Image (cartoon, helix red, strand yellow):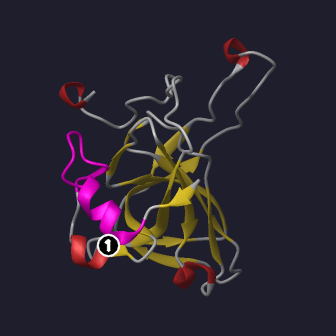
Amino acid sequence: MGVLSSQQIHALLDADPPLVGGLADVDVQLQPNGFDLRVESVAAFADGGQVGASDAERRLAPTHDLEWSADGYLDLAPGIYLARLAETVALPAGVMALAKPRSSLLRCGVAVHNAVWDAGYAGRSQVQLAVYNPAGFRLGRGARIVQMVFMTLEEASERLYAGRYQGEGLAEGQR
């Protein structure tokens, strides 16, 4: 397993479908070992959720979208939020991904938590935004919040992601 270089990521941006779509500025977002993804929306949790032994027992926690201020910012109190990413991701059979928070967020007392992006996943993902700073955090719409790192598998996966979140956040024609 190896990590894709900026040259390999750049080449896959021209694939059909592109590795990452809906880009704002490739020159800014492309990093030496990954690709920065931006925040599109942020939601607050309205109630609890549930995960059981089977998928039938899963109930996602309800959320409600927060409204961006007129200047394009959110003032987030300490707590946990659900953030939708602006870009789409389409992983081929030989690539999986992980994302880490950008260091500027960490230096502000904010973390981003997420799961593994499996080979074959396509969608506009969500991540958990955790504001640990007791003074809160001010987040601008379109801010780069995570760096996605793409890893090649030693062998392309025969079993591609086909779970509940396949195509999440995509318009009907994009699925």
The residue furthest right is 53
Specify few, some or many for label 1: CA neighbours under 10 Å numbering under 14, 14-19, or 20 or more: some
Depth check, front residue: 14 or 50: 14
Give residue 42's quadrant in the image. Answer: bottom left
Rendering coords of residue 64 (x, y %):
48, 44
The residue furthest front is 154
Give residue 169's quadrant in the image. Answer: top left
Q: Residue at x 59, y 53 (%)?
A: 1
Residue 113 lies, with reference to residue 119, above or below; the image says below
Give residue 173's quadrant in the image. Answer: top left
- Magenta-drawn segment: 5-22
- Secondary structure under the numbered disc 1 in the rendered image: helix
> Is 97 on the left-hand or right-hand side of 19?
right
Depth check, front residue: 37 or 18: 18
Rendering coords of residue 118 (x, y %):
54, 39
Residue 126 lies, with reference to residue 169, above or below; the image says below
Rendering coords of residue 37 (x, y %):
39, 63
Q: Residue at x 52, y 76 (%)?
A: 102
Residue 117 lies, with reference to residue 127, above or below; the image says above
Q: Residue at x 68, y 80 (%)?
A: 133
- Labels in figure, total: 1
Rendering coords of residue 123 (x, y %):
37, 39
Q: Residue at x 21, y 46 (%)?
A: 15
Magenta stretch: residue 122 in it?
no
Magenta stretch: residue 8 in it?
yes
Depth check, front residue: 72 or 174: 174
- Please state which amino acid type lies under the numbered disc 1: Gln
Reading the image, the residue beneath label 1 is 29
Question: Where the C terminus falls, by quadrant?
Answer: top left
